Image (tube, grey):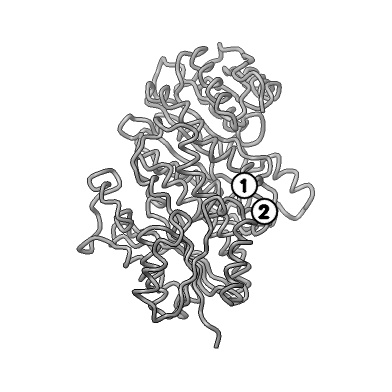
Amino acid sequence: MSGESGEGVAGDTGGGSKDVAGDAGVARVALVTGAAAGLGRGIALALSTAGFTVVVTARRLAAGAEVVAEITARGGSGWASECDVTSAESVRAAIEATVTRFGRLDAVVHNATSRRSSEPVDFERARPQLWREHADVSLTGSFTVAHAAYPHLRETRGALLLLTSPAGMRGSANLSFYAGVKGAQRGFVKALAREWGPSGVRVNGLAPLAVTPALASAFEADPTMESRIADKVPMRRVGDPETDIGAPAVFLCGAGSRYVTGQTLIVNGGRDTFL
Amino acid sequence: MSRRVALVVGADDVGEAVARRLVRDGYELVWCDPVEPGSVAGRIAEGDGDGGGVVTLGASLDVLGDPDDFRAALGSTLRDAGHDGVDVLVYTLVSVEAFVPRPLAGLTGAEWQRLAEDPIRHGLTVLQVAHEVLAPRRGRFVLVVPAVALEGAAELVPLATAAETLRALAKSAARRWAADGITVNIVTPDVFAYGAEHLRGTDVDRGEAVLPGAGTAADVADAMSLLVAPAAGRLTGTTLVVDGGALMAP
């Protein structure tokens, strides 16, 4: 569990914002969970490049602050906030601190996932606690994040984006619990999009394939793994968190997707074409 | 020839219709109603007794909270009934309370847990234990969840989330168990097949079914029957949408 939730570290807020959000003159604010590394970091950087002020949340404040330093070095604006998505109090504190500091919240990206996501599961024998570890972050976490963010997203007619996975659509023999919680997010996105549509808040999913730290470690342990995966991708490579995944995330957070809700955008080089 | 055995886990009209259909098709039935144990087993035995006896598996929702507890309860029941395995396992259990529309913003954490996450736990438990009872007979698993899993519906977020989670877990099981000759498929009826008439006119009721009349629990049972038929042996991980042609996807 995290300690003082909402505690933050600021970067230079004077960076030159570009108006990708489609609302000239307004400094839009996005909060990203699990943003200290991997996909979350890539999305945070991309959002910053696109002109958002980015709240980088992470279980360890120092790790989030490193990403904020990158944002600041690029001329963007960011703030690090400690947040443990398995704690409703921590999530609420981080979101309230964001709104207190910046006065608004336009987009929330729930990217955090269990550190055990990439571990194969002995499905038939796995104990309930292991499911709980997956569910706490992705399933309960989706509820907690959405619940805490809604009053503020309603004010800005903003966007909620959940990072899901093709595994949630296809199932997975080895990563079955990961597939389960990612499927959960698909059902959550569709239902909540229909519920929040009248208030102008959009809810979407993004299902990426990218080189995360966990995947990079797996590639090191198994040198042929990357090429085996890439061989199944028509574009013959595994995506980059910032340049390949960040840009679609920016689209789904910004005004360019103002009429898109309840959708899951698969961003994996054409690996899955069934949707 | 050994007796064909079906286990039905479910407590509502859909579960009862599925159970009746299996008995009519000649299966010996093991019935597990964790909400009201034993409430309808007697009625099924009296009304459709030609297929053989009906055995009640007295597993409460607490038992469905832990695979080891359910494994023990199911093993004991099957042994007492003289069954060495199960040919068909149909999971129809849905929280009746989850059909009550509620905005997400008004839910407490405890309500979310009860409406969304507890039902997932129950279904996951049964899936985890299913393999060992289906494997001896290269059996069939059928998951029945409402079609809100596919389309969502306002104020039914917990129901849609739980249903889609179980669908993803069932597909994972289908991938794992295919080599053992076990198939896992899914039936998704519209909410009205569950008798949720109070949802008429709400967001979930788009009135887009093209077939006349309303879907019923018996329609769900018929779809289940298709998936457990010998001719369906090549189908696994698929979803049969029983909604009168409303969705027509993919």
Task: Work out whether residue A49 can be spotted.
Answer: no
Q: Are marks 1 and 2 in contact (CB under 8 Å)?
A: yes
Residue A48 visible somewhere in the drawing: yes
> For the residue carrying disc 2, how many other residues have a C-alpha within 10 Å: few (<14), some (14-19), or many (20+)?
some
Q: Specify the amino acid type for callout 1.
A: Trp
Q: Nearer the viewer, residue A220 or A227?
A: A220
Question: Where residue B5 appears, x then y in whole percent?
Answer: 51, 76
Left/right of residue B101 with respect to residue A246 in the rendered view: left
Q: What is the secondary structure assignment of the residue under circle 1? A: helix
The foreground one among A226 and A183 is: A183
A244 on left or right of B99: right
- Extreme residue toward the bottom, this view: B1
Q: Are marks 1 and 2 on the same chain?
A: yes
Give the vertical position of A138 relative to A174 (above or below). above
Return the chain for callout 2: A
Q: Which residue is mark 1?
A: A131
Give the position of the C terminus of chain B as an image quadrant.
Answer: bottom left
Q: Specify the label residue A119 is tagged with.
A: none
Residue at image position (50%, 38%) is: A162
As helix, strand or loop, the secondary structure at mark 2 comes to loop
Which image quadrant: the N terminus of chain B? bottom right
Whole-percent x, y for residue A71 in the image: 62, 21
Quarter of image, res A135: top right
Q: Is residue B39 left or right of residue B87?
A: left
Which quadrant of the figure has residue B174? bottom right
Q: Chain of mark 1?
A: A
Which disc number belongs to residue A126? 2
Q: CA distance from mark 1 to mark 2?
A: 8 Å
Q: Amino acid at mark 2?
A: Ala
Please tell me which residue is depicted at 37% across the width and 61% down the height of the picture.
B14
Q: Residue A243 in the image: state x and y as whole percent.
A: 58, 36
